[in-house]
Image: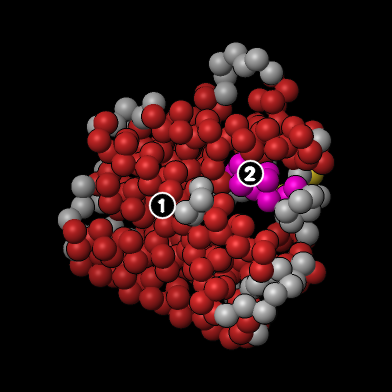
Amino acid sequence: MKQQTQALEDVLQAFYQSDSPDPVLVESILYSIEAGGKRLRPLILLDLLQGFGLKIEEGHLKVAAALEMIHTGSLIHDDLPAMDDDDYRRGQLTNHKKYGEAAAILAGDSLFLDAFALLAQAQLPAPKVVKLINLLSLASGTYGMVGGQSLDIRSEGQAITLVQLEQIHHHKTGRLLHFPFVAAGILADVDEQTAEDLDQLGQLLGLAFQVRDDILDETASFEELGKTPKKDVAAQKATYPAFYGLDAAKTLLGDLLAQIDRLLQKLEEQGFDAQIMKERIEGLAIGN
């Protein structure tokens, strides 16, 4: 895992080593990229590829790094005053607090666009690259993360239905967590049934991660989160604890993780090495 993480960091750093018309822009981008984080999304992709028996190549790392660029850009924009208005991310000042609001907007813009340049450079079969570019774009923009963020903002302080809550988080959080599973199926040339199982796994994990994030916002400390806790409550955001209650949200998370585990067992029966993925899923559990 450490080797994968370092290889991923190397790809991200290498992309920004070329001369830029504005070195300060690159500095602000790297400030957020280097802030740490679990690199959950790209590492899931690499774990899946290894589980299918693929040797990780530079092309795979570029796909994973492109996904992390999109995620990091979204965090920069999430923290802006017009969005979640937070001063800290991953334990350090947010990008706009360090470099100013305009610079942070541009850093996020760059990461959204640079991701597709990096992905297009991946030394992989061209048809697969085209599929991945399309998939990542749809997961990120109007029909994915950005669409979900828009719904999330407009739902603040509103009474919404469970269907609406699920729609918000399916797009806002779920689509970028769903991407590694579908991308792995494309890269590993899996059969139709396995592709369907991966699709379901991705959807379940996306939902589980959002439920967990909502729970931690209410229960974890600044030191544990690396950002201001209870922001969702203060903003009257639509969350699973707000809808179900905290205990029921924890039960829902446990049920989702159990469903994911059963699907991983099914893939194991078809030859997939699920050990690393199972360890990742166990790490998402929250005690009562």
Q: Relative to 25, is 197 on the left or the right? A: left
Query: What amino acid does circle 1 point to?
Result: Phe
Residue closer to the observer: 264 or 147? 147
Q: Please say whether residue 92 is visible from this viewpoint.
A: no
Residue closer to the observer: 64 or 220? 64
Query: What secondary structure is marked by label 2?
Result: loop
- The percent coordinates of residue 170 (x first, y second) are 49, 64
Residue drawn 68% across the image and 46% down it? 77
- The percent coordinates of residue 180 (x first, y second) are 40, 51
Residue range (magenta): 72-80
Q: Give residue 179's mark.
A: 1
Q: Is residue 89 above or below residue 174?
A: above
- The percent coordinates of residue 103 (x first, y second) are 74, 32
- Mark 1 or mark 2, earlier in chain: 2
The mark total stands at 2
Q: Main secondary structure of the magenta part?
A: helix
Residue drawn 39% across the image and 26% down it? 121
- The percent coordinates of residue 272 (x first, y second) are 25, 58
Magenta stretch holds residue 75 = yes
Residue drawn 26% across the image and 63% down it? 196
Could you tell me how far apart the alpha carbons at marks 1 and 2 are, in whole angstroms? 21 Å
Question: How many residues crowd around disc 2 within 10 Å: few (fewer than 14), some, or many (20 or more)?
Answer: few
Query: What secondary structure is marked by label 1?
Result: helix
Quadrant for the C terminus in the image: bottom right
Magenta stretch holds residue 9 = no
Residue closer to the observer: 111 or 82? 82
Q: Relative to 88, is 263 on the left or the right? A: left
Q: Please say whether residue 192 is visible from this viewpoint.
A: yes
What residue does disc 2 label?
A: 36
Query: What amino acid does circle 2 point to?
Result: Gly
